[in-house]
Amino acid sequence: MIKKKYLFLLSFLFIHNVFSQGTGQGELALEFRQFKDDGNVTTEDSAISVFSRLENKYEGESWKYVFRGFARVDKEDTDRSLMSIEDAYLKMYLNENQTFAFSAGYKIFNWSTTEAFHPADSINSRNYDTNLENLEKLGEPAIEFQMELENFHWTLFYFPRFERPFYPGDQSRLGLGADLDKPIILEGSELEREQWVPQYGTRFGFTIFDFDLAFHAIDHIDRNFPILGTHQYTTLLGQTFPNDLNKLLNAPVPYYFRSREYGFTSQGIFGPFLLKIEGAIRDFKESDPIYTLLGLRQITDHQEWAVGLEYSFTHDYGGETFLILEGNSVFGTNEETRAELSVFQRDAFFAVRHAINDVMGKELMFGFFNDLERSHEHLYTFSYTQRLTNEWKIKGGIRIYDAPQKGPVPQGLEAYDEDHHGYLTLTRYF
């Protein structure tokens, strides 16, 4: 971790000094998080962290560079400390009108259109110690060739490396009570512990009438659907047993699989509503089964689709209220498999966002998640945000998880039941 910190800082200083014409900005935040006491002395109910982000960028006539990264150091839960490069790439324009371009480096990709569910947003690995509906993204190295016209864009991608997701430790209330082992890629019967694996894809989009449409096809190691368990097990007299039960319980391995994914996103005006649709069809490479706490499991082909409607209206005093309704569902599997694949395997989300639109940018938001298939699985969220000055901003909120465990192994939101917490973030921009 220390070496990574030095590399991160040296890289930023190098870029800033070499490209001194670039513009820089950043933020520094104090983050507080307090959970409801669970009566377990091995978990941390409080979190106090310092978060910082640095950004530097420059754009000339024929090229531009972007550098952005963040670091978080937590005083109470050291497993939560993290440093990540988000964007660090160089982009070269190949013609005078900048229609064609080539870029290489780390990048954050945002392919989603919906507020809470993101079936088509598949590229970046995530930090799982953040909000389930909007997990913090980690940069992924990519090489891109782009063509961009007024109402059409097309990109070819090559992703040379599988960036490991960041998992909460065994002390975290948002974890699984275990320190997960390093991820392993399983392709067929072959295990790959290295992160350098070839992945590629293409994406194109266009505007028609009042809708923005985009399609993608990628062959990659899917970051969103790991199986936690072990490939080291024994079958005897028709029964299967893990070779090391203690490791399975306390340090299971996340296994990731290669997938061919075909995705779609769309958003546009539909009468008085903003209509959003996105989805993905995932065809996984058939691989050996993994032994889990639920028995032998294999990754399953499936589709996932989300649809959302947003309606807004303005108040006489200038404020604006947004009503949001979204649904998400996994298709092509049975109910049991859906629950193992995703927390939001068949859920609805309703939210109200109210922007006061004053000089301090005050905004309130209430959100409610309800599982439409599994009984008694709810998530309630409330947040309030405003600027204090031009440089200072404050955000606070509450999250309530109501999902009692119904079987021998928690599934979906059950893993977060009673992990209610409040949070407060004070940010200084510079």
Image (tube, grey):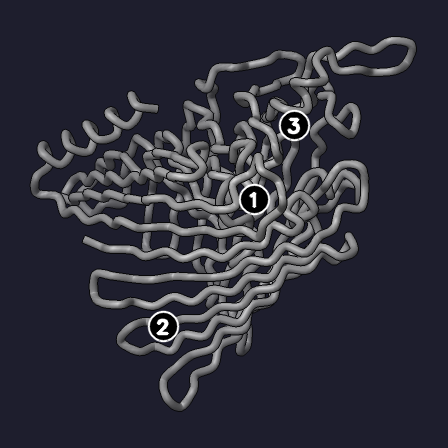
Mark 3 neighbour density, 10 Å: few (under 14) some (14–19) many (20 or more):
many
- What residue lies at 32% left-to-right and 71% top-to-bottom? 361
> Dot 2, crowdedness within 10 Å: few (<14), some or many (≥20)?
some
Cα separation, mark 2 vs mark 3, equals: 42 Å
Query: Disc 1 and disc 2: Cα gap in Å?
Result: 36 Å
Please tell me which residue is depicted at 63% across the width and 44% down the height of the picture: 39
Residue indicated by mark 1 = 263
Left or right: residue 240 versus residue 320 is right
- Which residue is the site of mark 2? 362
The image quarter containing residue 411 is top right
Q: Quadrant of residue 83?
A: top left
Q: Nearer the viewer, mark 1 or mark 3?
A: 3
C-beta proximity under 8 Å, tags 2 and 3: no
Q: Can you tell which quarter of the image residue 154 is in?
A: top left
Q: Nearer the viewer, residue 117 or 382?
A: 382
Marks 1/3: CA–CA distance: 25 Å
Secondary-structure class at tag 1: strand
User: 101 left or right of 398?
Assistant: left
Q: Position of residue 303 (x, y in %)?
A: 67, 43
Q: Tell me which label, 1 or 2, sits earlier in the chain.
A: 1
Q: Nearer the viewer, mark 1 or mark 2?
A: 2
The reply to whether residue 118 is in sight is yes
Q: Is residue 221 above or below residue 234?
A: below
